[in-house]
Image: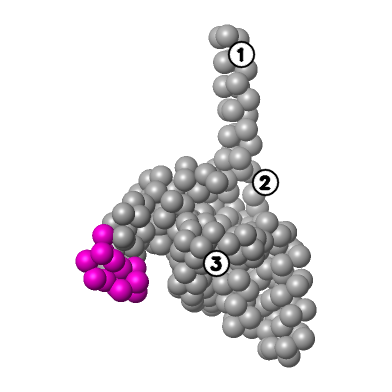
Amino acid sequence: MRRRSAWLYAAALCAYAFLYVPLAIVVLYSFNDSRLNAEWVGFTLAWYKTLFADDQMITAAGNSLLIGIVASFVSTVLGTLAGVAMHRYRLRVLPILIVAPIAIPEILTGVSLLIFFVMLNFTLGLGSVALAHIAFCIGFVAIVVRARLAGMDETLTEAARDCGATPSQAFRRVTLPLIMPGVVAGALMAFTLSIDDFVITFFTAGAGTVTLPLQIYSMIKISVTPEVNAVSTLLMLLTLLLIVVAAKISPTLLRTAREP
């Protein structure tokens, strides 16, 4: 039994090392006092100063933040309504329609949205990227909200209705406050997915529209400089911060999201 446990611990250690050692290297070399990542020369913060003085990078970051805020807000509203509908009405088709964008490969989603925008003669830009992000973020928010609703005591809503509250009043004053941690966690998840997305953004951005992932991609086609490591480190920290906030707001989110 102990031998089996040792093998399990070793396998887990190798798996976590494979996942996190490359990330640690990116963070470490963002402080490297050399333009090449071949060897460690010394500690410096110069690459972060260069990063904040890069107008193209600042513009790309601003575009990503704008798209992320818009996409997370709209997808949170629509995803919350979709989650409530899935929980209350138990329709067979609705969960399939909502979860399908999550299950479909991103490259297929990006190509299909590109074709859709071209058919509508819709100008590709920040608007098309925001609409594309809303389309695939709704499902994530709906799943989180539905998981939150599954753990809610429905007798509270019924009691509000018995006291004379209309369905909309019962939702606003009872249901919504109770599921608010799930709603906020879904919004943070949607923002994280939006600001990190590359594949769908690549197909729907159009010429002249640059987001942070696209800007990083254009930079690493030449070489991976410490400036790329610096912006990757900041993006990683932002993502981790949002994950921590979501976990604090809804501690059972990761467990309940997997439950059928």
Distance CA(mark 1)–CA(mark 3): 42 Å
Magenta run includes residue 210: no
Q: Which residue is mark 2?
A: 38
Q: Is residue 233 left or right of residue 248?
A: right
- Dots 2, 3 in contact, CB < 8 A: no
- Which circle's residue, 1 or 3, is located before the other in the chain? 1
Residue visible at 45% across and 72% down?
Answer: 77
Measured along the vertical axis of the image, is residue 185 above or below residue 15? below
Please report the residue visible at 77 percent of the width from the left and 86 percent of the height from the top: 119
x, y percent for residue 154: 35, 55
Judging by the rendered image, the residue that carries numbered circle 3 is: 138
Look at mark 1 in the image and give the residue it sits on: 4
Separation of marks 2 and 3 at Cα, in angstroms: 42 Å
Instruction: Name the front one of labels 2 and 1.
Output: 1
The stretch drawn in magenta includes residue 169: yes
Q: Residues within 10 Å of mark 3 (few under 14, many from 20)?
A: many
Q: Is residue 108 visible?
A: yes
Q: Residue at x 29, y 66 (%)?
A: 161
Mark 2 or mark 3, earlier in chain? 2
Please, what is the three-letter code of the amino acid marked with disc 3? Ile
Mark 2 neighbour class, 10 Å CA radius: few under 14, some 14 to 19, many 20 or more: few
Q: As shown in the figure, which amino acid type bears the numbered disc 2?
A: Ala
Q: Position of residue 95 (x, y in %)?
A: 60, 60
- The mark nearer the N terminus, 2 or 1, is 1
**Badge 1 density bin: few <14, some 14–19, many ≥20, Cα 10 Å:** few
Residue range corresponding to the magenta coloring: 159-172
- Left or right: 69 as drawn, with respect to 102: left
Secondary structure, mark 1, is: helix
Give the CA distance from mark 2 to mark 1: 39 Å
Query: Which quarter of the image is occupied by the N terminus?
Result: top right
The disc at residue 176 is none
Residue in front for this viewpoint, 38 or 168: 168
